[in-house]
Amino acid sequence: MVKNKTMKYPKVKNFYNGDFQESGSTQWLEVVSPVDGNWLSLVPMSTVSELNAAVQSAKNAFETWSRTPIKERVQVFFRYRNLLEKNFDELAALISEENGKTPDEARAEVEKSIELTEFACSMPQLVTGEILEVSKGVECRTDHFPLGVVASIVPFNFPLMVPNWTVPNAIVLGNAMVLKPSELVPLSAQKIAELLKEAGLPDGVFNIINGGKEIVEAVCAHPDIEAVSFVGSTKVAKLVYQQATHHLKRCVALGGAKNHLFVLPDANPEMTASNVAASMTGCAGQRCMAASAMLAVGNVDRIIEKICEEARKIIPGKNLGAVISKEAKERIERYITEAEREGARILVDGRGAVVEGKENGTYVGPTVIDYVRPEMAVAREEIFGPVISIMRTENLDEALEIENRNPYGNAASVFTNSGGLARYVMERASAGMIGVNIGVPVPREPFSFGGWNESRFGANDITGKSSIEFWTKLKKTTTKWNPEARINWMS
Ligand code: NAD
């Protein structure tokens, strides 16, 4: 459904050996803006030999980069951080255009990318090793060593921020990286390559390979890739985790989510309603931290009314962005229709949203569904749209049981004025990131990001201090400084 006949940007390129490289692939996909259906570019489904070239480029660069002192490596990222700021408006416009989120949301994404880079710039302070005299004249010390060539596979919903979860940390820590952007939003990643080059990153340390399933499978099997990080749906996260670990690689794979908000009768109605509405509709509900299910504990009718009032103020094309594609719009609307057919009540209905002048854009309005039963698909599955499914429960334990039963476990939030009840939920919700009176409980740097259960496979979180464990290996050195003393180093 492409409206304009001419492509706005040049074809998307791969990036290795420090330069943009045109793919020789015969398979290309259209990149279309969800905002208005305009044709932005073409993205190649790169060949495995192109992946091999990108990996070789990283391998060649690794030797020198890994031996460069971290205090020098980090200088590149101070400059990159400033370039993100300098290119702020252009980056935000590109994110909004390729992903469909509102200009304000796109600006927040650039701000968050800057914050992530600032964290990476603090790495020299965080990776100092330990040293101890373990016996007379005998010392043990630890050092963090980079892994080698590493890969990062990313989803469509944050074209700039999610790559910046991994790129600065992994590279500052001395690795060379191959990034596989989402084929739906490959343009922001081109800008990352451009800015890292401008910041002075040596050729080959950062590389991009575009493609889909075939390239991801080849990444997971590649003998020269040491570690794979993945962010995307649970279905693919499982596959990537299985494939990468089958090939004996280190892997962290973040998956989808079904985030529950517990709303208690003593919650502040205005604050709760605005937080719930913002959480379910921000980035058109396409955030892995979006509120998707609400557990209404006891009588919270007053708060539900206010949530509906807030939701009605959120207008597609104004303060609500587009969903990524026509298929996504159809999938979300199918969920709503199915819930209605099964007896749920649609209090606010976002189906059939059309934005004047952007008729080829893909919009879904805010949707509030009440009297959802836990067995319904809208209660169990990730919808990834601006939809909240309200389940009514008599007490908090019943609500916790519903949340605990859900296979995902990214985030959960509780709205209450009672510290005791908040703590009760904080301790019992089965999720990696908990909010108290916060709709989107993203842990800001230096706290790490990562869910539980089927929202994350692998031992580490993907950002923050946890990323140090993931992107490095520990070397332990024992030294005897006084060999002439002839002491047993174990004594
Ligand atoms: P996706 O799983 O469809 O795609 C993610 C990446 O995997 C893309 O680069 C894509 O090219 C590749 N891919 C797709 N299908 C594949 C297959 N069969 N085999 C190998 N690779 C494949 O996810 P998406 O639709 O781009 O992103 C949305 C999903 O990401 C949602 O489920 C959302 O919750 C999740 N997400 C999770 C987090 C988190 O931190 N847990 C953050 C952002 C997004």
Image (spheres, grey):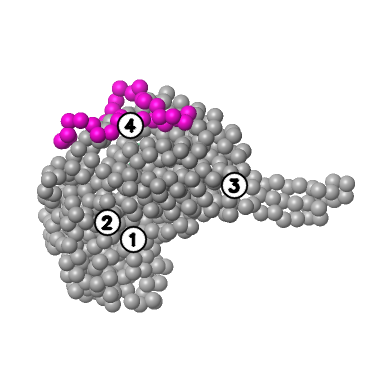
Q: Is residue 226 visible?
A: no
Residue drawn at x 48%, y 57% as measured from the top left: 446
How crowded pointer 2 is (Cα within 10 Å; few <14, some 14-19, many 20+) is rated as: many
Q: What's the distance in space between the residues labelled 1 and 4, CA to CA?
A: 33 Å
Q: What's the distance in space between the residues labelled 2 and 4, CA to CA?
A: 28 Å
Q: Which residue is mark 1?
A: 440
Callout in the foreground (3, 1)? 3
> Residue 12 bears which disc, if any?
4
Q: Earlier in the sequence, mark 3 or mark 2?
A: 3
Q: Which residues are magenta?
A: 1-29
Q: Earlier in the sequence, mark 1 or mark 2?
A: 2
Q: Is residue 104 visible?
A: yes
Q: What's the distance in space between the residues labelled 3 and 2, CA to CA?
A: 38 Å
Q: Which residue is mark 2?
A: 282
Q: Which residue is mark 3?
A: 71
Quadrant, the N terminus: top left
Residue drawn at x 33%, y 38% as measured from the top left: 187
